[in-house]
Structures are given as C-alpha cells and as structure tokens.
Image (cartoon, grey):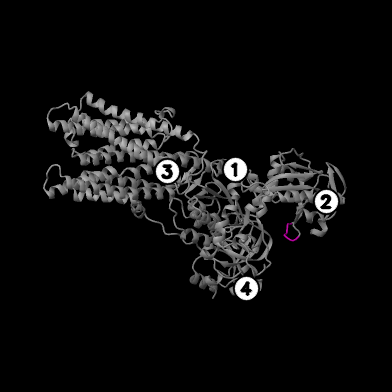
Amino acid sequence: MVGKDESKVTRFYALSKSALFKQFQTSDQGLSSEQAKQRLAENGPNALAQAKRKNIFQRFFDQFKDFMILVLLVAAIVSGVVAHEWPDAFLILAVVIINAVFGVFQESKAEEAIDALREMATPEAHVRRDGNVATISSENLVVGDLVLLEAGDIIPADLRLIDSASMKVEESALTGESVPVEKSAAPLADEEVTIGDRTNMAFMNSNVTYGRGVGVVVATGMDTQVGRIAGMINQAGETSTPLQDNLNSLGKTLTWLILAIAAIIFVVGIVNNHDGLPMDQLVIEMLLTAISLAVAAIPEGLPAIVTIILALGTTRMAKRQALVRKLPAVETLGSTDIVASDKTGTLTQNKMTVEKVFEHGQLNDASAPIPATDSVLRVMTFSNDTKIQSDGQLVGDPTETALIQFGLDHDYSTEAALAKEPRVGEVPFDSERKLMSTIQQLADGKFFVAVKGAPDELLKRVTQIEVAAGQVQPITGKDRNQILAQNKGMATQALRVLGMAYRIIDEVPAELNSETVEHDLTFAGLIGMIDPERPEAAKAVADAKKAGIRPIMITGDHQDTAEAIAVRLGIIPAGDDAAVITGAQLDQMSDQEFDKKVKNYSVYARVSPEHKVRIVKAWQDQGKVVAMTGDGVNDAPALKSADIGIGMGITGTEVSKGASDMVLADDNFATIIVAVEEGRKVFANIQKSIQYLLSANLGEVLTLFMMTLMGWDILKPVQLLWINLATDTFPAIALGVEPTEPGIMDHKPRGRKSNFLSGGVGSSIIYQGILEGMLTLGVYGLAIMFPVHSSNDAMHADALTMAYATLALIQLFHAFNVKSIHQSIFKIHPFANKMFNIGVATSFIMVALTIVVPGFNSLFHVTELNGIQWLMVLGAGVLMIAIVELVKLFQRRSNRD
C-alpha cells in the first residue's frame, strides 16, 4: 500500500508515466473504489492541520509572564499579607488586571479570522475511479487518484501531470512567479529541481488559467507543498519584540535597584531607631517603610500605560490603512532596520501590463496613441481567449487579459471588433510551437489570420513585414536583425515579449493546423509586457533609504525579472549584478558563509519558503530588526519568523494575513513607511512616558530615603499610591499621543540594541529625579524652618502635607519638560495637546481634593494649607521647569559645539 511517508522522498517529476503508475498502483482507469477507501482510512483526509489556538483564559494568563507584572504581583502580596496594607494591594492588582484585559482584548480581536489554509481548499475535485469520472469532495482525495483539470479549476492536491493540453497554471501565491507557468507531462531530469521549475507538477491551491490536463495525486494534506508551509507556520516560534525585550530589561534593572535601596533603608532604619521603638515593632515599621519604597519605586502603571499608548497607536495606524494584529508590532516598526519584501503583488501589481510596442520600425511606450485599424492591436485582440464579463472584468490568462486591457486603455471596442469580424477557426496554443492563431471573418468575404507567440518561432513563418499602415513589403535580413535586436533589448529589461503577425486568405483551410494556417505571414510588431512596479513603490523605497532602512527584495521569480524590477525601484543600482543571488546559489552556501555575505545581497530570486526564512534569520543574526512583507502562501513562514510580518489586505492570501503582525488594508508599500513613522513616534512617546514616570519615582525614592536617614516623618503608602495613581496615569497616557517631532524620519533606525534609556533619557531620568527629590525635601525643610503652627505635631503635619503636595504637583510641572527630550517646551507648543492639558488638570484636581475637601484629610494623613504654603508648593514646580530648561539649553549648545 502506498503511504504518505513514501510520497515525501520521491522526485515524482523525474518518473515516467509507467513508473508513476507502478509506484502508486494505479492506471488510466484510476483507482478502484476499494483502493481509495482503504488509502483514505490509512492516510487520512486531504486536509491541512490547524495549529492549536489558545483559549481566552490561556491568553489572559499569558499577560502575567512579563517580568514587571510579576514584580508588581509580589509587591501586592507583600503589601496585603505581610504589612496588612490591603488598599495598596488592591490598587496594584487592579492596575495589573486592567493591563491584562487590554492585551487579551486586542489579541482576541486579531484572531477572529478563520483558518486561512482551510478556506483556500477547493471543495470538489473531478476524479477518475473504476474507469468513470466522478465529482468528489477534495478532502476524500488519496494518493494515486487521477484528477481531471480544466481552465478555472483550483488544484486540490499536489499532482504529477500525465497529460497536458496547453495547460497553464498560476502559481504566484506559492512560487512568486508573476505569470502562469506552461505545464507539460514530460519527465524532467532526475536531479534537484526548484518548485518553480517543476513544469510537470501542479501544486495544491494553484489555479488552472488555460487548457486542460490530467494528473496523479502524489501528495495530500500536510504532505503537499502548501501543507509543508502550514507546518512551518505552526512550528515557528514567536519572536520577542524589541519592546518586550526593553520592558523586561527595564523591569529586571528596576527590581534589583529597588531591592538594594529597600535593603539599605531597612538596615539604616534598624540601626538608627530614631523613635526608640522595641525591636519587633521596629522591624514591622521598617518593613512598611521598605514596602512604601517599593510602591514608590515600581512604576506599577507602566505596563498598562505602554499598552494604552500602543493601542492608541493602532487606532491612528488603522486610519492610515495599517491594521495591527499584535500590539508590540507598533513599536517594532519604529526600530526596523530591514524591510524584506516579496516582489509579486507587494512591490509590483501582480498584473501583466503592456509597456512597449514595436511596429513600423519604431519602439513606442504603451501610452502612445494607436489607431483602431492598427494591425498589432487587431492581432492581439483576435488571437485571444479572454472573456469580458458583464461588469467589465477580464477573465483569462493574465498575458491575454493584459493585451485586451491595452486595447481598452486606447478606447478600442474589443467586443464590437469581435462582433464585426467573428472567429470562425483557430489553432490553439501549445508549448512546442509557442504560437496561437485564430481566423476571423471579414466583411468582404475574406479571412484575417491573427497569429501571436514567441518572436523567434513567429519569424520562421514570416515572409513579409508591415512598414507603415497599409504598406507591406518582403522582409529582409536587416528587418529580421532589427526585430531580434528589439526582442533582446526588451528581454534584458525583463519584459515578456510576444510577436504579432497576420495574413489575409480567401478561404478557411479544410484542416486547421500549423502547416495549413501559420505560413507566409506578415510581421506586424512586438509587444513587451511586465508585471510593473506599484506607482508609489519607488518613492517608498527612497523614503525607506532616507530613514536608514534597507529594502530587500525576495521573490520566486526569475533573476532577470527580479533584477530589472529592483533597478526600476531603486533597490539596487543598474548593473549591480553582485547584489543579486538565486536560491540555487544560496543552497551552495553554508550558514556561516551566508552570515558573512548577507550584507552583500539586496535581491533574492527563485527562492523557496525555506530560503526566505533563512534570509530573515541571517539578518536577525546580524542584530537587525527585520520586517517581512508579503501576500502569498509562500511568504507565511518568513512572515512568522520575522520581527514583524506585514501582510497585504486586498491581494494577500488569508494564510499570509494569519501569519502577519500587521496587515496593509490598501496593499500600498508606501503605507509601510507611514507605519514606520508611526512606530518611531510611538517609541519616542513611550520614552517620554518612561522618562516622566521613572524620574518621578526616583524623586519619590530619594525623598523617602533622605527622610528615613534624617529621622523625619515619612510619606505614607496611601499617599504614595495616590500620587502615583493621580499623577502617573493621565499625563503619561497623554504623552503617548504627543504630535510627531520634526525630523523623526531623518535619522537611522535605533536598532535592536537600543532601549528606552538611550538617547540621553537615562541621564535625564537621574538628574531630574534627583532634582524632584531635592525640591521636595527643600519645601519640607522650609516648612519646618518657617512653620505656620507652633506645636511640633502640627508643624510636622504641615511639612509632610507640603512635601506630599510638592512631590505630586512638581511631577505635573515636569510633564511639560518631557514633551521633548532635548527641545525647549517653548518651541513645541506646550498646550497644543488637548488630551495632555485635560490629563494634567485632572491630576491636579485629584491631588488638591485630598487636601482641601474635608473628610479626606484623615484618610490621606494631610492637613489644610494656606495661601503662602500653596505658593511655596507651586514655586517648587516652576523651579523644576526653569532648571530643566536651562540644562536642556546647555546640552543643545554643547552638541552644536
């Protein structure tokens, strides 16, 4: 019995028909019903396995794997269980849960798409069993089945063709080939042949665009080429993004700092024991102090704030046609070094288009005017099987639809021409003679023979040439050389060239074949076609290079075509052949050799899905952040392996969308650059939020530390939590929607090694945090030196309240400073962000209410302040802005020098 394992290792393309029948125990009559039933039971249905998806609870608990979240959970447990500060514990847990809900909501929204590969599967197949043709569900196909194919069919499994009548198959989604592939039944050499060159094979989910054929099923389900890709997708591990790496690194750093400082404070407090407490009470007191410090030091709102900033970024990107499926992808775009793009359908239109017309000795662009009586136009219209549907859509072979579209673009009424001069005979295209001919009835009773095909084959049958409209003369050697030179010239530009010829005859031959129809032809002209680049792609490539991003083209198409498109797009300069490499050449390189040479190549041609993954990995091994764009099934594994996979929303297969982190709704390559700009903006704004949060928390830590050393009353956990809740959340989120700063796309990508503390942010956090702490301690000291009340308790209560108010409000003033890390706030319109203004005002009100509203005083351990005391608090805030602005001015002048 033939099983699946055997089908994996055989080069079916090298087998003869008899050897194929012998291996699969089948014949021209097909399998017997009993054979098919037994094989289906043994090998299973012709279906693709689905990767197991996580349920909502698994996704929820996945949100708690972040290191910062784990630290917060520990802090919550210690606060509640050990210190019995349950309000603190519940507040921390609430922030953590909100963050988790945000993450699950976004992922659940993104996973609503149905399994792509199953949706692509054809529902029915025409097979021959027991000598009879039957229509069955494609899931019931087994190896050895004989499948009958015709134009319009979706191929239901991997087939080895045993009969092909002018059959062409569109394989761009699998191989990247931009034009349908001509198929034959002849065996190929028994050597390794790339998928795109296996001309006697037909692969699952490809489309038959022309002709008919018969094939033997050699692989089903997960053993097909599409199945192998599905397996690679399922096995590909999730790549951690730079954002996740940065947050984890930041969380670990903060944790060790917090533990160290808390330990120091605990020990200092035990040693000093300013209040003379018993040891057991002292230990509890200092433990509460250490927990207060942890609450102050840990930016518990950071994960939630980062999530919200990313979510706001996805909303803005959706309005600009970039749909994000995974939140970290927003920020990852901003750090992208390499954009590895598929050619067909991504950089190009995946639509053959006429570009050049050579006739009457002149080479013209396709846009040049052409009369309705033109011979080239008539030949390409008549020798054509394209169908025009009622809605105007063209259905047929992409090469032929391009010819009809050319006529329509020049206001040529194709349907009227066919109605006036109908087809009365034809000699269909076949891959041996590479020609197609039709015979049209003319109004005068004569017949017009229209012949199109390969120029070299056409010229063998030409005896005359049209040198001008209505002027025909015998063709000379010079004419032939000129035609061949034009053919070669267009071919070197990766244009697909077709020749056009015709003859007028008095009657239709009794037998229609090449010998009776295709002779004594008059040469009319040449047509050059290509799958052209998208109009906006060249500018997008230039913009990417300006932003320091290297565009890489990866395609299954031929080397000449790939190089020509790459030159036209500006990916490589003309003549830079060394920047182009094929999949076959790549196979000859070891991983070590390729890692050394990967920077030399910008264009990869005739590659397989495995090659694409290898290319992505090689760049990642160089420390680069790689974005992979693509629309075909063949792109899915690399999309999954890349740091960010970008699918195409319109022309993209559901498989590629399912494997991607982001989908371009308009299939516009230029949208990637827009998304990169948005990603850089998101990172810059997250940096601002982190600078704001960590400098504020450092100020709180320094304040607590110095208060403990000096034996002062220290801020209570509830005060610190309220400060964090009131001043952290709203301004930090509002900083996340700050407008893009000028010149954000004029510098190189920050790369994988950069982090949130790069670019002067780390040093700014340190000096600004120290400044916040010193100003707060200064206000506390002034309150003690110039008290409003005479009693010691009231004096210290006022001082603590003023320190509480200063520590809170100074952070709100500082929020204006961090609207730009280096630029002056007076140059960036400090009040332009309405959300920021509302956030700061809300935070101010929340802090002020705890002091001025009766009843809140005892809850928050504060007293009412008079006008002078409030002026001292506000004065510290103004000083914060003034000092930071002076430092930024000094930094800018130092950088200029």
Separation (CA) of disc 4 from disc 1: 49 Å
Q: Position of residue 846 (x, y in %)?
A: 26, 33
Separation (CA) of disc 4 from disc 3: 66 Å
Left or right: 799 in relation to 614: left
Give the labeled residue for mark 4. 21
Q: Earlier in the sequence, mark 4 or mark 3?
A: 4
Q: Which structural element holds mark 4?
A: helix
Give the labeled residue for mark 2. 481
Give the labeled residue for mark 3. 758
Separation (CA) of disc 3 from disc 2: 64 Å
Q: Disc 1 or disc 3, which is closer to the eye?
A: 3
Occupied quadrant, residue 595? bottom right
- Residue 565: numbered disc: none
Q: Earlier in the sequence, mark 1 or mark 2?
A: 2
Give amino acid for label 1.
Ala
Give amino acid for label 3.
Ser
Q: Disc 3 or disc 2, which is closer to the eye?
A: 3
Question: Quick check: is 40 in the magenta stretch?
Answer: no
Q: Earlier in the sequence, mark 1 or mark 3?
A: 1
Residue at (80, 49) in percent of width and height:
483
Q: Earlier in the sequence, mark 4 or mark 2?
A: 4
The magenta-colored residue range is 428-432
